[in-house]
Image: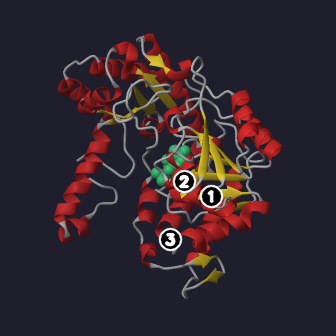
C-alpha cells in the first residue's frame, strides 16, 4: 500500500491505480541496481503530487507572463536558494524539464548550429546529449569525442588535451552515464581555458555524491554545471543548471524562452524538498554510504571473478565486462531481472559486440543504500548476481531476494 494512499485514484480509475500499486510492489520486492535510479522520500512524492501542477508560470521569479504568482514565485525562489546553498554556486536555474533539455540549453546558450562540441563518446560512458550522432546534439552540431584508455578503462587527460588542441571545440562536456571513476574537473578546466572553450560539467549521475561531499565538486572549475535531480540527488524527475555569474543570463535565456514554456511547478516544489533533505547532515552520511556500498559490492564481485571496467569504482557505479563469464550483457540482465535483481545491459569500452546486445552490465548502489542496505549486505548481493548470471533457477533466487528486501523499508510504501 502507498503512504500516502491513493484512494481517489483507486475509486476513479482502478485500472491505473492497480498499475501504480503493482509498480510500487515491484520496486519493493526487487534489488534495484539501475545506476540512475533511486527512491524519493514521501515528502518529495507529496510535493510532486500537489496542486502546484495546476499553475502556469512562464518566465522567472518576479518576471512572469501570467498572473497569480504570489505563491509559485516563493516556491521557485526557495528551490533556487537551496541549490545555491547546497552546491555553493552563484546562480541556479531549476526549470529544465529533465537532463537532456538542460544540456540542450547549454548548446543554445553558447554555440551556433554547426559549431564544435567535445564530449565523451557514448560507448565509452558519455551521454547521448554530449554530441552523439543519433542525438540532435550530434546532428545539429559538429562533435568530437574522447575515450577512455583501453588498458586502464579511465580517461587519459593528456589524450583529452591533445584532441582539444587539435580540434578546438567551443564547448566541452565532462561527465557521463557509465563512469565508475572520479572526474578530474580541474584538469578539464585547464584544457577548456587553454583553448577558450566553455566547460560544462554534467553531474547528472553524481550530483548527490557531490552534494554530500563524496565526490569532488566541479564548482570553481566548470562555469556551467548541468544535473538531473532524480539520480543520486534523490529528488523528483527534473534538472537544474548551475552557473557562475558570468554565464547566468545566457543560460536563463536559453531555458526560457529559448527552449521551454512553463516550468513544472510541482516538480520545482519537489526539487526544493529534495534539496532541503540534501542540506541535512544525514544526506552526507547517505552519500558516503552509497560509495562505501559500491566499493564493497565491487570487491565482492571481483572475488567472484567478475571483470570490472577500470578494476573497481570511486563512486556509486560499477561497470562489469561479462566476456570472461561467457554471457552477453542482455541475456545476463534479463536473467538477473527474473531473479529479482534489476539493472541494465551496457556497452563496455572497446566493446566487440553491438550496442543493442553489448558485453556489459551497469550497476549502481544509490537505491539499495536508500533502502538501508550496508556494506555487510554487499557480498550477499554479489552471490545472487553470480548465481543468476551462471543460470541458476531464477524463481528460487527471486524468492530469496524478495524475502530479504522485505526487511528494508521503502519510502512511500508499506507492505500490506
Ligand atoms: C541521465 C543523464 C542525462 C539525461 O537525463 P534525462 O533526465 O534522462 O533526460 C544527461 N546526462 C547524463 C550524464 C545523464 O546521466
- Gap in angstroms between the C-alphas marked 1 and 2: 8 Å
Q: Between residues 354 and 210, which one lies in front from this camera angle?
A: 354
Residue at 74 percent of width and 32 percent of height: 162
**Which tag, 3 or 2, sits closer to the chain's start?**
2
Residue 45 rendering spot, x and y as whole percentages: 42, 59
Q: Is residue 346 above or below residue 271?
A: above
Pick whichever of labels 1 and 3 is earlier in the sequence. Answer: 1
Q: CA distance from mark 3 to mark 2?
A: 27 Å
In this orientation, which residue lies closer to the viewer: 386 or 413? 386
Camera-nearest label, 1 or 3 = 1
Q: For residue 112, what is the image quadrant?
A: bottom right
Where is mark 1, residue-wise? Answer: 107
- Residue 283 in view of the camera: no
324 with respect to 146 (left or right): left
Earlier along the polypeptide chain: callout 1 or callout 2? 1
* Secondary structure type for disc 3: helix
- Image location (x, y in percent) of residue 50: 42, 70
Q: Residue at x 53, y 65 (%)?
A: 268
Please tell me how crowded label 3 is: few (under 14), some (14-19), or many (20+) other residues with Cα within 10 Å.
Answer: many
- The residue where tag 2 is placed is 137
Between 103 and 373, the one nearer to me in the picture:
103
**Pointer 3 residue:** 265
Amino acid at each position: 500500500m502507498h503512504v500516502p494512499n491513493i484512494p481517489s485514484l483507486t475509486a476513479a480509475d482502478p485500472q491505473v491505480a492497480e498499475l501504480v500499486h503493482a509498480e510500487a510492489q515491484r520496486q519493493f520486492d526487487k534489488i534495484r541496481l539501475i545506476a540512475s535510479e533511486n527512491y524519493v522520500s514521501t515528502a518529495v512524492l507529496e510535493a510532486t503530487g500537489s496542486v502546484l501542477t495546476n499553475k502556469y508560470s512562464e518566465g522567472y521569479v518576479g518576471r512572469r507572463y501570467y498572473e497569480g504568482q504570489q505563491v509559485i514565485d516563493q516556491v521557485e525562489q526557495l528551490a533556487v536558494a537551496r541549490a545555491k546553498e547546497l552546491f555553493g554556486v552563484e546562480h541556479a536555474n531549476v526549470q529544465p524539464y529533465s537532463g537532456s533539455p538542460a544540456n540542450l540549453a547549454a548548446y543554445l546558450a553558447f554555440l551556433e548550429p554547426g559549431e564544435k562540441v567535445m564530449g565523451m563518446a557514448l560507448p565509452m560512458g558519455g551521454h547521448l546529449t554530449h554530441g552523439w550522432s543519433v542525438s540532435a546534439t550530434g546532428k545539429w552540431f559538429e562533435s568530437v569525442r574522447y575515450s577512455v584508455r583501453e588498458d586502464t578503462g579511465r580517461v587519459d587527460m593528456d589524450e583529452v588535451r591533445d584532441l582539444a588542441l587539435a580540434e578546438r571545440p567551443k564547448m566541452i562536456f565532462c561527465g557521463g552515464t557509465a563512469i565508475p571513476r572520479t572526474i578530474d574537473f580541474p584538469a578539464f578546466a585547464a584544457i577548456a581555458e587553454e583553448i577558450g572553450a566553455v566547460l560544462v560539467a554534467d553531474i547528472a549521475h553524481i550530483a548527490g555524491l557531490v552534494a554530500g561531499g563524496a565526490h569532488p565538486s566541479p564548482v570553481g572549475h566548470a562555469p556551467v554545471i548541468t544535473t538531473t535531480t532524480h539520480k543520486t540527488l534523490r529528488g523528483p524527475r527534473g534538472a537544474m543548471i548551475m552557473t557562475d555569474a558570468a554565464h547566468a543570463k545566457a543560460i536563463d535565456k536559453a531555458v526560457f524562452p529559448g527552449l521551454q514554456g512553463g516550468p513544472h511547478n510541482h516538480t520545482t516544489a519537489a526539487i526544493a524538498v529534495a534539496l532541503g533533505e540534501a542540506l541535512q547532515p544525514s544526506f552526507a552520511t547517505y552519500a558516503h554510504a552509497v560509495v562505501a556500498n559500491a566499493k564493497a559490492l565491487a570487491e565482492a564481485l571481483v572475488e567472484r571473478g567478475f571483470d570490472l571496467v577500470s578494476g573497481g569504482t570511486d563512486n556509486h557505479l560499477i561497470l562489469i565486462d561479462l566476456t570472461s563469464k561467457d554471457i552477453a550483457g542482455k541475456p545476463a540482465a534479463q536473467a538477473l531481472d527474473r531473479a529479482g535483481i534489476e539493472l541494465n545491459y551496457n556497452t563496455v569500452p572497446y566493446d566487440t559486440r553491438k550496442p543493442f546486445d553489448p558485453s556489459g552490465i551497469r550497476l549502481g548502489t544509490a537505491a539499495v543504500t536508500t533502502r538501508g542496505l550496508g556494506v555487510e549486505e554487499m557480498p550477499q548481493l554479489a552471490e545472487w548476481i553470480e548465481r543468476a548470471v551462471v543460470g541458476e533457477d531464477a524463481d528460487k533466487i527471486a524468492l530469496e531476494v524478495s524475502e530479504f528486501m522485505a526487511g528494508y523499508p521503502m519510502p512511500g510504501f508499506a507492505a500490506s
